[in-house]
Image (spheres, rainbow, N blue to C red):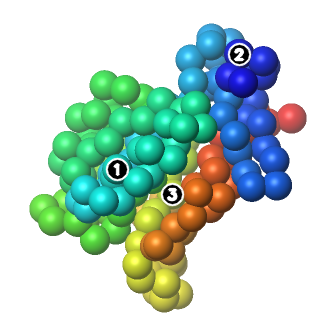
Amino acid sequence: MQGSLPAGEVQVTDGGAVGGVAEGGGARPIRIMVIDDSKTIRRTAESLLRKEGFEVIVATDGFEALSLVADHRPDLIFLDIMMPRLDGYQTCALIKHHRVFRNTPIVMLSSKDGLFDRARGRVVGSDHYITKPFTRDELLAAIGQHCKTPE
């Protein structure tokens, strides 16, 4: 399905995005990074997204993620909030304060669903917030919302 979409397009169905190619005219799949200290969450998200045709990079914490972001330049980042060493808020702020990555969409993932947590995510630059446990459709909808070519 990836090859049939114009560059920068994400096909969206009732369930959300279904795959596509990233902006820039190449046939490279949309590159998604998943940062979470939970092996189960990383594997689940990676499996769901790969099945939909996305390229997936995973990181276990914020420190690992920072070097991988620079190396792989993801089109969208799913970022857990509660992680050891460098939490999701700190990681988000560091990514968003870098001129090269400030426009990279970051979707916060958290088991916390409070107004304060959502607001704090916005303050550090997150673009979207998904509460765990997430569904396939929630991940795909976030990708569809943030990885489309502006019209």
Q: Quadrant of residue 83?
A: bottom left
Residue annotated with mark 2: 3
- Disc 1 marks a residue whose amino acid type is Arg
Q: Are marks 1 and 3 in contact (CB under 8 Å)?
A: no
* Badge nearest the viewer, 1 or 3: 1
Which residue sits furthest top?
26
Q: Are marks 1 and 2 in contact (CB under 8 Å)?
A: no
Q: Secondary structure at mark 2?
A: helix
Q: What x and y, as percent, mark residue 81? A: 34, 68
- Residue 75 visible in the shown view: no
Q: Is residue 30 left or right of residue 65?
A: right
Looking at the image, tell me whether mark 3 or mark 2 is earlier in sequence order: 2
Vertical comparison of 7 with 74: above or below: above
- Disc 2 marks a residue whose amino acid type is Gly
Q: Residues within 10 Å of mark 1 (few under 14, many from 20)?
A: some
Give the Cα separation between the discs numbered 1 and 2: 26 Å
Looking at the image, tell me whether mark 1 or mark 2 is earlier in sequence order: 2
Q: Is residue 139 left or right of residue 19?
A: left
Q: Secondary structure at mark 1?
A: helix
Q: What x and y, as percent, mark residue 113? A: 49, 84
Residue annotated with mark 3: 107
Q: Is residue 55 left or right of residue 147?
A: left
Vertical comparison of 124 with 21: above or below: below
Q: Residue at x 23, y 35 (%)?
A: 67
Give the Cα separation between the discs numbered 1 and 3: 17 Å
- Disc 3 marks a residue whose amino acid type is Val
Image quadrant holding the C terminus, namely: top right
- Residue 3 visible in the shown view: yes
Give the Cα separation between the discs numbered 3 and 2: 26 Å
Q: Residue at x 68, y 55 (%)?
A: 141
Q: Residues within 10 Å of mark 2 (few under 14, many from 20)?
A: few
Q: Is residue 87 left or right of residue 73?
A: left
